Structures are given as structure tokens and as C-alpha cells.
Image (cartoon, helix red, strand yellow):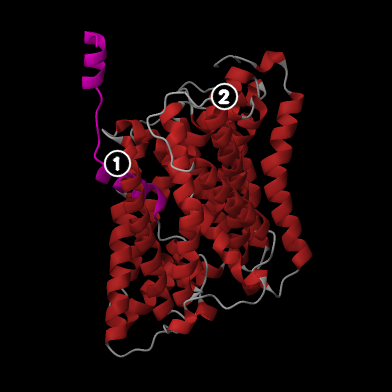
Amino acid sequence: MSSTDVSAKRTINYISWVALALMTTSSVASLRPSPTMAVYGLASIFLYLVPAIVFLLPTALVSAELASGWSGGVYNWVSQGLNKPLGFLAVWCQFAMTIFYYPSLLGFVASTLAYVINPDLASSGVWTAIVIMVCYWTGVWISSRGTSGVAGLASGGLIIGTLIPGALLVILGMVFLGQGNESAAPMTADHLLPAWAGLSSLVLIVNNFLSYSGMEMNAVHVGSLKNPGREFPRAMFLSMGLVLLIFILPALAISWVVPAEQLSLTAGVMQAFDAVFAEFGTQWLTPILGIMLVAASLGGMLTWLAGPSKGLLLISRQEGYLPPFLQRLNKHGVQQNILVVQGLVTTVIALAYAFIPDVSSVYWIFSVITTQVYLIMYLLMFVAAVRLRRTQPDHPRGYRAPMITGLCGVGFAASLAALLIGFIPPSQFGSGSVGVYLLIVAGGALGLGLLVPYLFYRLRKPSWKEAPAS
């Protein structure tokens, strides 16, 4: 071994598998989806566990192999495994899902903030629309100035906005039950499985696929482990356990306190805090918890705002997938035009909150569209992983996923099933028009996820490559 090899080995900053597990947990776990699953009470355990096994685990192990063998993220994985156009589709879906993700995230911020100011505002579509637009455009302004250290704003998000409020919610919920209060949701063994009322009764499980998404981002750290083959699976199983606890326990605590028929999908966390604090005469704590949740969510939004769009920009300048207008950078080196165009679409989406009476329905629809667009990327990733194992079996990999064909088969089938189930209106929204629901979801998911990138690809010109940076 040469001295260069030795020095290169010494410069690697190894991390422990426990540290990687905690990093993964912080990027995946959140209290935001808790109200959605609290509707199901004890059955939320089943509805969290199933996608963890059939989606979270395959995604984690497969993306670890890809990340340890091929740099460049999902674009390079799909480009090498399938072809460049499909690679562009994968990286586009990774970016496009944020167009609907931010309105749903900021819808949660709006309802949480309402409990700090006036709880009645939580059901106001106009209030929600205003908060979404103000927060998003403020985020664009901050990001476009190239402010360094923005990521630090979200570094404490796991503790401030998830662990402390989540632990407090669970502890107070247990005290609530311990004082002799009856649980709002039945906690008996015959409620472990969701009531079956056709496919529509299982639609809310789709939201959990979005809750678990993002594992392919963390797979890039597999090279920082001393023994990836042994340590990465340990890290993933530990993080999966922690994520399940953070998702399940607060959801159960909410179901103990707030009856399902009164539960708002956006404001459910604050409803539970407010109800529990009222029991103990400490409702003055509700606004404080609300500010903590809002701060963590906004920090996370700022961290992710420029990330996916930057990845799309780099690939587009290299291959000429986007017109020069969208490739231009401002004086701070930020892809401001992409952020502004994305913001215009986000503004239109935000206005839907103002014109559709049921805020929870809008929140759910946007969550489904977000999930379906992202699932297109995962379908491509699973197929590419199998192809790369067959076409490049000797390519060096720091980690090799066990039974990769089976893992990819399970992950692909689960992703496809979740994508198709998303087109079915959930049983909670049975009173609405099925046709309108299908039109909105299909138009959003297929239009944004497939039609728009197809048009960009077909209309591309040689002059779009290496566009000027100014």
C-alpha cells in the first residue's frame, strides 16, 4: 500500500453506527403526521409498522448499496442502471414533490400558529393560505441571499420540535389515563387492525410512505462507517425502531385525548396539547409548544428549500434539461429563478386552502400528491438497483444489500400499491365528489410528475447545456 493510500485512509472521518442511526432518525421522524394516524387509534401501530417493513427497510438497504458504489445521487443511479432520460425523471420527481410538500408543511405551521394567536383560525382557509405564502416567500428571500449557516437553524429540530413536545405529549397522555379518564379511542385487542370498509379504509396508510421517505439521502453516509456490511444494517434497524416510537407513541397519545371525529389532520397535535393542558390547568403552555413546533418546521423548510432545486440545476446545466432562464444564478450563486417559479406554483396551491372549505381535505390531497410524485422516483430506483447488480456485478461497492432482487421486488410492489391506492378517496372524505378528488390527485401527480419533465425533455435544445451562470 502506498503512502498516498495510507494518508487517504487516515483522513476519513468515521462515524459510529449509533450516530448514523440518530442522524437518520432526525431526518425522518416528525410529529406532523401524528394526527393523521391518531384517527385510527390503536390500529395506527399496524399502519406504521407495515410500510416500515415493506418500504422503509428496502429503501434504506438498497439506497445504501447504490450510495456506496455510485456517487451523484439518484440521477446517477438511475442513469447508469436504466438511462439518462429516466435519470432526469427521477431527479425531477425528487424536486417536484417539494412543490406540494411545502404547502402541506406550511399548512401544519399555519394551524399550529393559530393556537398561539387564536385557535379558531386553525379551520380558516384564508388564514392558512396567507401563512403559506408569507412563510414560503420569506424563505425564498432568505435562501436567495445565500445566507450561510441556514442548515444550523434546523440542527436542533429533532430535539426542539419533535423529542421534547412528543415526550411531553406521551407523558401527559399517560397521566391523563392514569387519573381515571377514559381513552377517546378504544384500546382493546380487537382494535389492533383498522376497520375494513373497502380499499378506502386503508388509504391513510399512503401518507406513511411520505413519512418514511428520504432514506436515500442518508445512504450517502455509508462510506463513513468502519465496517459498512455489519454496521449499516444495525444503524437502520435502530433508526427504524426509534422512528416507529416517535411516530406511534404521540399518535396514540392524541387518540387518547381527542375523539377521532373532532380531529383536524393539520391541527391535531395542538388540539391534543390544548386538551391535555386544559386537564392540568396549564393551557398557558399551549402557545409555547406551538412556537417550538413552528420554529422546528420553518428551520426544516429553510434547510430543504434550496437543496432539491440545486440538484436539479446541476444536472440540467450539464445535460441541458432546463431552459437557460431556469438555470441562471443570482450574485450569491443561488438558483433564484427556480425558487421564484416554484413559489408562484406554491402560491396558486396555497389559494386552494382559501377556496376549499375543508382545510383537512386540502391538506390530505396535497400530502397524497406529494407522496405519489416521490414514489415515481422510488420505483425507478428499485428497478435501477436490480439492473446495476446484473450489469455491473463487479463494480466496487462499500455495502451489498442482502437478497437485493427480493428487497427491490418488495419495495417496488409496495411503492406501486401506495401510488395506486392514493387515487382512492379515504373513507373519512366519503361525502365529497370522487370525480373531483380523482381529477385533482391525478392532475397533480401525473401532470407534475410525468408530463412536465416529458415536455422539458422533448423541448430541450443543445444551447441549453452549460448556460451562463449570470
The residue that label 2 is drawn on is: 315
Q: Pointer 1: what residue? A: 231
- Residues rendered magenta in the picture: 1-29
The crowding category of the residue bearing disc 2, from other C-alpha atoms within 10 Å (few below 14, some 14 to 19, many at least 20), is: many
Residue 93 appears in which quarter of the rendering? top right
Whole-percent x, y for residue 114 in the image: 46, 65
State whether residue 95 appears in this view: no
Asked if residue 301 lies in the magenta stretch, the reply is: no
Q: In this view, does 383 lie above or below 265?
A: above
Give the mark, 1 or 2, whose residue is nearer the N terminus. Answer: 1
Q: Residue at x 40, y 80 (%)?
A: 256
Nearer mark to the viewer, of 1 and 2: 1
Q: Taking 340 as reference, is 276 left or right?
A: left
Look at 27% across and 80% down and name the residue there.
Answer: 175
Q: In terms of depth relative to the viewer, which is nearer, 193 or 327?
A: 193
Please tell me whether residue 232 is drawn above or below residue 124 in the rendered image: above
Q: Residue at x 41, y 28 (%)?
A: 397
Which residue is located at x 61 percent, y 52 percent?
Answer: 413
Callout 1 touching callout 2 (CB < 8 Å): no
Mark 2 falls on what kind of element?
Answer: helix
* Amino acid type for the residue under numbered disc 1: Glu
Instruction: Quote the CA–CA distance across marks 1 and 2.
Output: 32 Å
Tag 2: residue type? Ile
Left or right position of 371 against 188: right
Q: Is residue 47 above or below residue 153?
A: below
